[in-house]
Image (cartoon, rainbow, N blue to C red):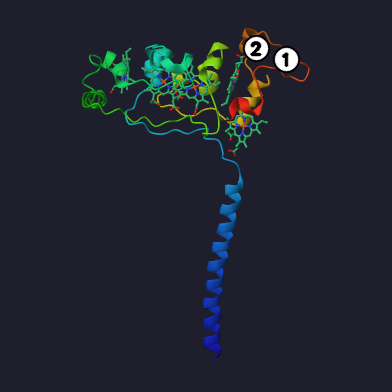
Amino acid sequence: MLSILGKLTKSQIRLGLFFGTLVGLAIVVGIVSLFPSASDQGYYPEQPIPFSHKLHAGTNKIDCKYCHVGVTRSHHASIPPMNVCMNCHRVVKTDSPHIQKLARAYRDGKPIEWVRIHRLPDHVFFNHRPHISAGVSCETCHGDIKEMDRIYQSKPLTMGWCLNCHRGETTPEQVLENLGKKRGKDGRADVAPVNCSTCHY
Ligand code: HEC
Ligand code: HEC
Ligand code: HEC
Ligand code: HEC
Ligand code: HEC
């Protein structure tokens, strides 16, 4: 009799622990998902072809705008189509398996599916053009791309990060000068608009 009670109690305890853990987990997951979307800073995906910015934009000094033609013209900087690569790789390094993969994809008309790294949520509006015109460098927002073999997101790209520069707190000196702005006693300058509709649809 006593031993049966003991067994029952043991399995009841185990059952209790099991459900206790489930409830605990549910609460933790619930709390974590209440926090606003975290930044993707540090995102470092593998790419289908190991294209190196360090080699192309660094060592070989190819201008960013040669490949990212949209950056001064439109919202999107744009990723170059394969014919831009083939301008050189019809003859350069054709013995490389990576270049052979590129040439095959080009011949078959199957674009390389580059993994997107920097991406704002859909409710945010961003345009490269006014930034480039004001003299904000690519490095300010993307880090030292010329030193990267594989690109990663080096800046937070959060709302606070955007606003700190629009309010003049983190604006590079050269950009303040280009726009003829000076910081006030509060360390701020009126660099770019901060009203919600500037960046939100
Ligand atoms: C020879 C062409 C070429 C040149 C030159 C080049 N890029 Fe790129 N860039 C690419 C390709 C292809 C990708 C997509 C693959 C990748 O992410 O590595 C890319 C991706 C990027 C991305 C990431 C886009 C994303 O998914 O968020 C950034 C940022 C970028 N380039 C900035 C630059 C800057 C800054 C320079 C100049 C210093 C530059 N690029 C020069 C071809 C080029
Ligand atoms: C203006 C010329 C030029 C353009 C445009 C260009 N490349 Fe290159 N690429 C080079 C040079 C130069 C090298 C270094 C070759 C060497 O190591 O001898 C190279 C090397 C490479 C390599 C390394 C190959 C290996 O196995 O060592 C890859 C991969 C590559 N390029 C991909 C691309 C892709 C993808 C694009 C288009 C987004 C592109 N390249 C556009 C000139 C160019
Ligand atoms: C003020 C900050 C800022 C500057 C300056 C900047 N970028 Fe960007 N870039 C971004 C943000 C933010 C995104 C993501 C945009 C989105 O998701 O809508 C992005 C996205 C990109 C992409 C991904 C593809 C695309 O078309 O959106 C490329 C490529 C790129 N930038 C290249 C460049 C180059 C090259 C320069 C310099 C000539 C540059 N960027 C300057 C903030 C910046
Ligand atoms: C390093 C400084 C800096 C950062 C970071 C920055 N901006 Fe800007 N932004 C500027 C400057 C400078 C201008 C142009 C102001 C001018 O031309 O008078 C501008 C202009 C704009 C404009 C056009 C405003 C208009 O209607 O005239 C938009 C939209 C914008 N930024 C959105 C963003 C978003 C979204 C982010 C963050 C992802 C961001 N910016 C990050 C400096 C910055
Ligand atoms: C200079 C650009 C800029 C301005 C101005 C701006 N935002 Fe944002 N906002 C962003 C960016 C970029 C994000 C996405 C990144 C993030 O969540 O931090 C964002 C995200 C948000 C989010 C979503 C947060 C989440 O958890 O996803 C809300 C809500 C928001 N903004 C409200 C506002 C309101 C209200 C204003 C006006 C007082 C405003 N924003 C002004 C750039 C801006």
Does 78 sit left or right of 141 as displayed?
left
Indicate which disc, 2 or 1, sits on the residue closer to the N terminus: 2
Label number found at residue 73 = none
Residue at figure coordinates x 39%, y 32% from the top left: 115
Secondary element type, mark 2: helix
Where residue 22 appears, as percent x and y from the top left, is: 54, 63
Residue at figure coordinates x 56%, y 53% from the top left: 29
- 27 to 192, vertically: above or below: below
Badge 1: residue crowd in 10 Å (few <14, some 14–19, many ≥20): some
Front one among 172 and 114: 114
Q: Quadrant of residue 196?
A: top right
The residue pinned by badge 1 equals: 183
Q: Are marks 2 and 1 in contact (CB under 8 Å)?
A: yes
Front one among 115 and 74: 74
Where residue 66 appears, as percent x and y from the top left, is: 39, 12
Label number found at residue 176 = 2
Given the image, on which type of amino acid does mark 1 rest?
Arg
What is the spatial separation of the Cα atoms under label 2 and label 1, in whole angstroms?
8 Å
Secondary element type, mark 1: loop
Residue at figure coordinates x 23%, y 15% from the top left: 90
Identify the image quadrant of the N terminus. bottom right
CB at disc 2 and ligand 4 closer than 8 Å: no
Q: Quadrant of residue 53?
A: top left
Where residue 87 appears, as percent x and y from the top left, is: 28, 13
Given the image, on which type of amino acid does mark 2 rest?
Leu
Identify the image quadrant of the C terminus. top right
